[in-house]
Image: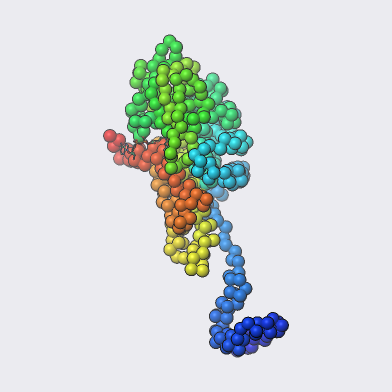
Amino acid sequence: MFSKIKKAYQLFKSIDFEQLDKLSRKIDLPKAMESFSQLDDKQLKGLMKMLEGGEPKKELPPINSDFYELHLRLDDEDRALQLRVREFMEREIRPLVNHYWLRDEFPFEIIPKLAELDICGLTYKGYGCAGRSSLMEGIIAMEIARIDASVATFFGVQSGLAMGSIYLCGSDEQKQEWLPAMQQMKLIGAFGLTEPEVGSGAAGGLTVTAHKTDKGWVLNGQKKWIGNAPFADVTIIWAKDVGDGEVKGFLVRKGTPGFEVEKIKGKMALRIVQNGLITLTDCIVPESDRLQHANSFKDTAKVLQLTRAGVAWMAVGCACGAYENALDYTRKRKQFGKPIASFQLIQNHLVEMLSNLTAMQALVYRLSELQDTGMLRDEHASLAKVFCTLRTRDIVSQAREVMGGNGILLEYDVARFLADAEAIYSYEGTKEINSLIVGRSITGFSAFV
Ligand SMILES: Cc1cc2nc3c(=O)[nH]c(=O)nc-3n(C[C@H](O)[C@H](O)[C@H](O)COP(=O)(O)OP(=O)(O)OC[C@H]3O[C@@H](n4cnc5c(N)ncnc54)[C@H](O)[C@@H]3O)c2cc1C
């Protein structure tokens, strides 16, 4: 009772009678007072809030896709690099990706800026490379993909597939010639394995041929989907030696006669990545440009093992980006007078996304530990690639769902993640092929054909 009197007194004290006079000429004040007197405490509070301009601003928790704080496993130097890459991606890349994605073009201006970060070929030892951990390399792939999966793919082709082929299969002279310049991104590489008619079956069925002659190796055939190929300075071409039937790798330089690249148009995913259809017509490559330690597909597979781990990390990054965007959106978007993040069904989506994301993160951290201790096997990388790309598909689709119509608008970013997840799901071995690799390892039976 006392509190009611006190409130009424305070209200009375704060009345501006001049204003009240003006108001009384506009509305029937006694009637209004009568209506107010019938309101209970809660209703009065609500009315006051409405008059004050709605709910007071609530301090919301920070958006953090590293829910289990896995970054605490990093030392200070690695954490600083992670944050540097994150800040760079936010500042330099985020503002321009949708523009280029829509136009199916590559932002060449980012290459020298990415080079300044000094993160290319991070795990290789020597040749200008830093010799750092696979874990750090994975984290960088995640941070890049968190903003854009196309830029992460461009970077993965350069740093992983192209440089990795030279690092693992090249002679010392070949490494000296290519790796330092590629590390600084002064030279860009591509990796040509897939063919128009041979995708998953590359291990046994390449149709591009390499014929040794007095003039050098003569390459013939086609390669499809080759990332960076339309502008690369060097493309690693994997071809079957007609002499011994084994797969060999060749460094094909830009402008080599008989090497033609046509840009693949009309992609609905990773539109910034420039993929090429390569036609090799009596393309001559000297013996000095044959990768000296690539003697069979087993050597190609060593490169793929390395990069499949990177693709798993990339999928995690793509999922982080989609989750963070979706969470942010649901806290700002209001329906029925409330942020949609306050609805139970929306929270269920967000928690499912975070659960998958956290499981993926824990898995790739362990994957990199296996890699860093020399214990990584093909099936480890394949399992991570399958699991992470599958779950990423779920996460991006839930992110799109909680954003309603805006989820399919490019300007809200999630539409790009949604489309790009499809390509990550298919390249570097489809779900089926990577599952067959794991299946063979756990059952002891190969079920490839
Ligand atoms: C955006 C993008 C970028 C790429 N970049 C590169 C690159 O830089 N360099 C490069 O060399 N390649 C690249 N690729 C190619 C990529 O690696 C292949 O697309 C992938 O390996 C699958 O091959 P495919 O598309 O020919 O599908 P296919 O092999 O024709 O497969 C079609 C379907 O059949 C299934 N399948 C095939 N065999 C089996 C089997 N034995 N059992 C069960 N199911 C099976 C597959 O899983 C898939 O679902 C890229 C692809 C994309 C989409």
The image shows residue 50 at horizontal and vertical percentages of: 58, 74
Q: Which colour scheme is used?
A: rainbow
243 displayed left or right of 339: left
Q: In which quarter of the image is the C terminus?
A: top left
Q: Foreground residue, 237 or 276?
A: 276
Q: Which of 413 and 393 is in front in this view?
A: 413
Locate the N terminus and report the quarter of the image it occupies.
Answer: bottom right
Which of 16 and 325 lies nearest the eye of the viewer? 16
- Residue 379 visible here: no
Residue under the point 59% across and 31% down? 184
Residue 178: give x, y in percent of width and height: 55, 25
Tell me which residue sits at (61%, 71%) in the image. Answer: 53
Q: Nearer the viewer, residue 419 or 153?
A: 419
Query: What percent of the width, then of the height, locates residue 115?
Result: 60, 35
User: At 46% from the left edge and 27% from the top edge, which residue is drawn?
Assistant: 261
Q: Kindly indicate the quadrant of the structure image that contains residue 211.
A: top left
Residue 300 lies, with reference to residue 98, above or below; the image says: above
Q: Which residue is drawn at 43% across and 27% down?
A: 278
Tag count: 0
The answer to whether 184 is drawn above or below residue 406 in the figure is above
What is the x, y in percent for residue 280? Answer: 42, 22
- When asked about the image quadrant of residue 92, the answer is top right
In which of the image's four quarters is ligand 1 placed? top left
